[in-house]
Amino acid sequence: MSGNVNICEITEEVKNALKTFRFRKEQDTSALVLKVDREKQQIIIDENLEDTTIEDLQESLPSHQPRFIILSYKQIHKDGRTSFPLCFLFFTPRDSHAELQMMYAGSKIALQKEADVSRAYEIRELEDLTEEWLLSKLGN
């Protein structure tokens, strides 16, 4: 059924960045932001944000273009434990170009598998990307 949807190629650079990001040792919140190169039909690296906040991540994203975000979030639990859940965020604004939305949607599952991340969340409005939203998804 997905014969019409162009699934974008995941470049070697992205595959290596995903691997490096997944096994990083830093003790902070970081994000690997990926985008689709429409002409080449490839997923490429947009930004690598180290030691960031959810607010900084929100400010770095374009409000009218989709993005894939692999997020390593420093979560401090009520009992004092600290964990670093890995999340796959699919940001797809309602007013972005339909063709672009389809390219992202068609590539989402393949990228999520490549990233080997089980926690996947979709967000439509940039202002909804907050620490409270993320914690509600992660279940503090």
Image (tube, rainbow, N blue to C red):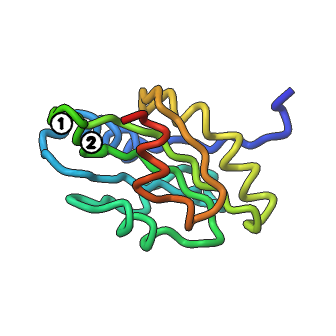
Q: Which residue is rendered at x = 37% and y = 60% of the image?
A: 54
- Find the residue positioned furthest to the front: 78
Nearest to the observer: residue 56 or residue 117:
56
Q: Which residue is rendered at x = 51% and y = 46% of the image?
A: 89
- Marks 1/2: CA distance? 6 Å
On residue 82, the disc is 1
The kind of residue tagged 1 is Thr
At mark 1, the secondary structure is: strand
Instruction: Give the left or right position of residue 67, taking residue 76 as reference.
Output: right
Nearest to the observer: residue 135 or residue 97:
135
Nearest to the observer: residue 77 or residue 126:
77
At mark 2, the secondary structure is: strand
Estimate the x, y position of residue 74 in percent, counting from the top left: 24, 45
The kind of residue tagged 2 is Gln
Estimate the x, y position of residue 60 in percent, counting from the top left: 42, 71
Instruction: Give the left or right position of residue 68, taking residue 139 as reference.
Output: right
Q: Quadrant of residue 56?
A: bottom left
Estimate the x, y position of residue 85 in percent, counting from the top left: 32, 35
* Quadrant showing the N terminus: top right
Verify CB contact (< 8 Å) between mark 1 and mark 2.
Answer: yes
Q: Quadrant of residue 67?
A: bottom right
Q: Name above or below for residue 60 compared with residue 91.
A: below
Q: Which residue is rendered at x = 45% and y = 66% of the image?
A: 58
Nearest to the observer: residue 65 or residue 40:
65
Q: Name above or below for residue 140 compared with residue 66.
A: above
| Structural crowding at the residue carrying mark 2, measured as other residues with C-alpha within 10 Å and reported as few (<14), some (14–19) or many (≥20) | some
On residue 75, the disc is 2
